[in-house]
């Protein structure tokens, strides 16, 4: 038995040496969180919310680089701050599409301006915008899977309450739930996903990774759980397919992953009509 | 037997506008109470205050300890983006067994919809499924916010008959809101006319002759009052023939402050 264990461990160690395997594992890990979370983003019509939070992460990157703090920490803090600003404004009845449009693009602009003040960061900029999944290290991998596990755990734990308050907040309230707390759970989960995903798919594509697999899963599912699970599969499949494409055609990895997801969405839109029956 | 739920001199202010002033009411076990009022009279706000969703700016709301409320909201938009079968919906937020869910659907007269998508149901089916979900929590009181909105008159009458049946079988109290005069009033033990404050209160027959009621709904001559009388003077068990009557009081403004 010990021999087998050693062999397996060695195999895994060797496997993780391959940057493509690491990249695929990062994509799959991320999908575990973005599938269910993205489903809520779609159900609650929070697409722009994802944009605002992820674009704000660029500002977080700049601040982290300027202050020598870990980038993940910086993005997490700024993404959280943005998520709370948006949630507060939404609760006060601001016109959401306009407000989010303003916030999302301003956050990105301020982030880009701030990055330009950080010496040496300029060259890396496209990595933060589009991600660099092929450069994922073992440490990054641990971060992605850890973050995904936290988000998944949070969503599974609050699942029934989250679904009920997504359907109707008064209904949730009458059942003794607190819809504001459930909103907070989603806000928190979104910030964590943005923080761990920014290196993998980049700030511009995080929202796409949230929305496209979930939207593609919609037509194939009859229950919320099925939709979340199918979104995970589509997200993971897109990551692997996109990396393949990137390998064959030397295309940028992050955008290739999203392109693969978009193709799956189109196929689902054309052929998947389970939910309509 | 104490009151299940009640308000004592309740006032509610929303965005600096007084919506409810000095409202006192209580619902006893097994009672059907209908709150009637024109649009914008604070009916929905009153229900939301009783449920603790909207804070009171004066007075207080009382609930019997451990009270279980079955709530049927005014409108529940199950978005096309969320796949949701009827069966799955019945398990929110408390998971129920298949047998329990099937029994609830049979109770509301929809034995075969469990596998259907919520978004594909007709208006009447949808309201019955909402009612089935509310009944699954074995509530002490059902709170219904204009539950028959969007139903045609036969559908509306059938829904109210169902509520009466459920009350007879389970003894559940019912507090509902309506701006629809005739059908509701026939089914109620007590009617409360609301217009920011309580204008009048009593049995349907007493209320319908009260001058406050006439002033509130402007029914001195024709219209819904005549319809109401018509309904009330007939037996309530057969199929109602409301569909053939003009329906005057259906100004649908759904946004109560």
Image (cartoon, coloured by chain):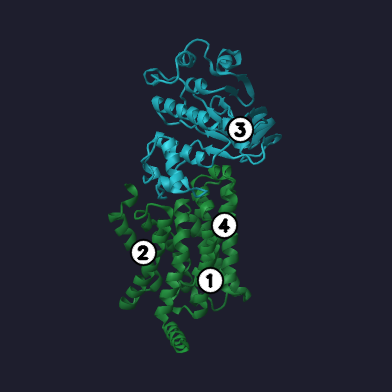
Separation of marks 2 and 3 at Cα, in angstroms? 47 Å
* Label 3 with label 1: CB-CB less than 8 Å: no
Give the color of chain A as drawn. green
Q: What element carries label 4?
A: helix
Residue at horizontal 36%, vertical 72%? A240
Residue at horizontal 45%, vertical 66%? A32
Residue A66 rendering spot, x and y as whole percentages: 61, 74
Using the image, name the chain to which the residue with label 4 belongs.
A
Separation of marks 1 and 2 at Cα, in angstroms? 24 Å
The residue at which mark 1 appears reads as A146
The residue at which mark 4 appears reads as A185
Residue A112 in view: no
Residue A254: image quadrant is: bottom left
Q: Is residue B29 above or below residue A220?
A: above
* Label 4 with label 1: CB-CB less than 8 Å: no
Q: Nearer the viewer, mark 2 or mark 3?
A: 3
Separation of marks 3 and 4 at Cα, in angstroms? 29 Å
| Disc with the residue nearer the chain's start (4 vs 2) | 4
Residue at horizontal 29%, vertical 59%? A267
Separation of marks 3 and 1 at Cα, in angstroms? 46 Å
Numbered badge on residue B46:
3
Horizontal side of residue A80 vs A6, given as left or right: right
Going by the picture, which residue comes out furthest to the bottom? A3
The residue at which mark 2 appears reads as A261
Query: Are the residues under marks 3 and 1 on the same chain?
Result: no
Using the image, name the chain to which the residue with label 3 belongs.
B
Query: Are the residues under marks 4 and 2 on the same chain?
Result: yes
Q: What element carries label 3?
A: helix
């Amino acid at each position: 038995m010990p021999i087998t264990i050693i062999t397996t461990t060695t195999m895994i160690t060797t496997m993780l040496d391959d940057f493509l395997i690491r990249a695929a594992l990062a994509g799959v890990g991320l999908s575990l969180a973005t599938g269910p979370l993205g489903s809520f983003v779609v159900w609650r019509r929070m697409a722009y919310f994802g944009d605002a939070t992820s674009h704000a992460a660029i500002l977080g990157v700049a601040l982290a680089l300027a202050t020598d703090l870990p980038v993940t920490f910086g993005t997490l803090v700024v993404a959280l701050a943005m998520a709370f600003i948006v949630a507060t404004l939404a609760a006060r009845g601001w016109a959401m599409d306009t407000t989010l449009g303003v916030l999302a693009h301003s956050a990105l602009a301020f982030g880009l301006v701030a990055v330009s003040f950080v010496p040496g960061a300029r060259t890396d900029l496209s990595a933060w915008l589009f991600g660099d999944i092929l450069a994922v290290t073992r440490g990054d991998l641990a971060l992605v899977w850890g973050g995904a596990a936290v988000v998944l755990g949070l969503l599974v734990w609050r699942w029934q309450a989250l679904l009920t308050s997504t359907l109707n907040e008064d209904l949730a309230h009458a059942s003794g739930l607190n819809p504001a707390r459930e909103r907070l759970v989603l806000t928190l989960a979104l910030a964590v996903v943005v923080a761990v995903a920014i290196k993998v798919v980049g700030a511009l594509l995080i929202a796409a990774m949230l929305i496209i697999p979930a939207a593609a899963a919609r037509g194939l599912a009859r229950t919320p759980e099925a939709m979340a699970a199918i979104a995970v599969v589509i997200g993971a499949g897109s990551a692997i397919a996109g990396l393949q494409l990137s390998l064959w055609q030397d295309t940028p990895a992050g955008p290739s992953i999203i392109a693969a997801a978009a193709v799956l969405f189109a196929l689902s839109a054309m052929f998947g009509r389970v939910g309509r029956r | 037997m104490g009151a299940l739920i009640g308000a004592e001199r309740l006032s509610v202010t929303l965005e600096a506008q007084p919506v409810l002033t000095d409202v006192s009411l209580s619902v006893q076990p097994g009672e059907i109470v209908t709150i009637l009022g024109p649009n914008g009279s604070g009916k929905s706000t009153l229900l939301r205050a009783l449920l603790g969703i909207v804070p009171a700016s004066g007075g207080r709301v009382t609930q019997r300890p451990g009270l279980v409320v079955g709530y049927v909201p005014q409108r529940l938009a199950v978005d096309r983006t969320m796949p949701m079968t009827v069966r799955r919906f019945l398990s929110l937020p408390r998971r129920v067994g298949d047998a329990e869910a099937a029994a609830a659907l049979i109770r509301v007269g929809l034995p075969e919809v469990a596998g259907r998508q919520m978004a594909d149901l007709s208006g009447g089916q949808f309201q019955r499924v909402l009612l089935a979900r509310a009944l699954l929590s074995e509530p002490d009181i059902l709170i219904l916010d204009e539950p028959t909105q969007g139903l045609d008159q036969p559908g509306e009458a059938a829904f109210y008959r169902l509520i009466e049946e459920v009350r007879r079988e389970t003894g559940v109290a019912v507090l509902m809101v309506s701006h629809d005069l005739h059908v509701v009033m026939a089914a109620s033990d007590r009617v409360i006319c609301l217009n920011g404050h309580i204008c009048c209160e009593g049995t349907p027959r007493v209320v319908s002759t009260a001058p406050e009621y006439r002033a509130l709904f402007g029914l001195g001559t024709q219209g819904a009052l005549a319809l109401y009388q018509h309904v009330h003077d007939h037996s309530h068990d057969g199929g109602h023939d409301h569909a053939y009557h003009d329906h005057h009081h259906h100004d649908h403004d759904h946004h109560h402050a």
